[in-house]
Amino acid sequence: MKLNNHVWALVLAAGEGSRLRSLTTTINGLAVPKQFCSLNGGPSLLHEALQRAASVASIEQTCAVVAAQHRYWWEAPLFHLPEQNVIVQPENRGTAHGILLPLLHIARRDPDAVILLLPADHHVRDEAVLAHALRRVTTLASQQPESIFLLGIEPDEPDTELGYIVPTGDTNHVASGVSQFVEKPSLKQARALLDRGALWNVFIVAATASALLGLYESRFDETVMAMRAVVEHDYDSTLDAVAATDLYQRLTNVDFSRNVLEGQESMLRVLSVPYCGWTDLGTPQRVAETLQRLPRDLHTNSHPQHHSYLNLAAQHMRLQFSNPAALQGLMP
């Protein structure tokens, strides 16, 4: 497949995964961030995200944003990426800042960039279905450079732990406008949302760098200017991360969906993705449910370069035997 010369993939790998801490903490008490774990002994969730990125972008145009405190975990898995494509956040200041810093790096290198945002902590059973949607949504973003495109997964059941995107019209084979976002509804609300054709919000976004920056500049212009100066420091001086560290100490937490996207629905479009076995593995219960649905003959070996630091299936089994009370009520 011929890749668009200006399509970039940005893998978001700086999260803490705190909701899954009971499963991602080793027997010795070491907490491994979720994205560096595997679901069942195969590649890590980070590597699975990098594989998705490869369906739309070359390795030269694949970036990852990571946390400075996770260096032990990401240095080996990201060794194959160009050094300048691994963008390190000195601290976690929310998803909005976690996107803005690498966004400015990419925009500096390619002002015409079309950027696909990919979380690094998802598992997908049918990757071919999602890969097709990723290629389609980046094409749409290239053709409509003023719009922000979101992917929404067609739900197979109401889920009170997920966010929903409510489209303005029929999403069958076309991108629709967005009327609202709903985060973690009640079960009754979730069922009503499904009746309205709402989609699971999977935090996969495609847009031009200029359109994404426009969202930020309309609300956080001073932060954009300050962070742009930090990016210039990285390229034009030997101060390394000093400027970034100083700025991040002054930043507050800002959420991308709630503080950047919400209220700017007129610029947003949502493309539906057929149900493909997607999960964010956000809670121990969701991990247990996903493990139950895995094919019995699933091949779990992986290339040595793609190893994970922890196997969630093995962790779940260990907790079942050693501390059943810790998983009480978490089995489907």
Image (cartoon, rainbow, N blue to C red):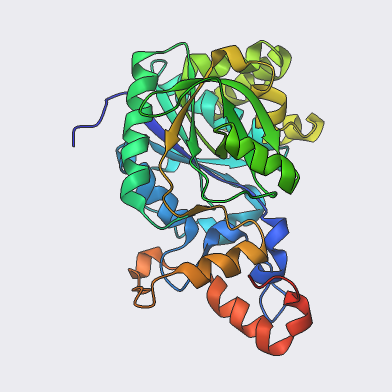
Question: Could you say which is closer to the camera, residue 294 or residue 227?
Answer: 294
Question: Could you say which is closer to the camera, residue 145 or residue 168?
Answer: 168
Determine the residue positioned at 61% across, 17% down: 265
Q: How many marks?
A: 0
Quadrant hosting residue 327:
bottom right
Place of residue 230 in the rendered image (x, y in percent of width and height, measured from the top left): 63, 25
Is 315 placed above or below 159 here?
A: below
Which quadrant of the figure contains the C terminus?
Answer: bottom right
Determine the residue positioned at 36% across, 70% down: 304
Which quadrant of the figure contains the N terminus?
Answer: top left
Determine the residue positioned at 41% across, 13% down: 145
Quadrant hosting residue 288:
bottom right
Is 327 placed above or below 204 here?
A: below
Place of residue 50 in the rendered image (x, y in percent of width and height, measured from the top left): 40, 49
Question: Could you say which is closer to the camera, residue 280 or residue 99?
Answer: 280
Quadrant hosting residue 320:
bottom right
208 lies left or right of 252: left
Visible residue check, residue 124: yes
Visible residue check, residue 240: no
258 lies left or right of 287: right
Place of residue 197 in the rendered image (x, y in percent of width and height, measured from the top left): 54, 33
Place of residue 144 in the rendered image (x, y in percent of width and height, measured from the top left): 39, 13
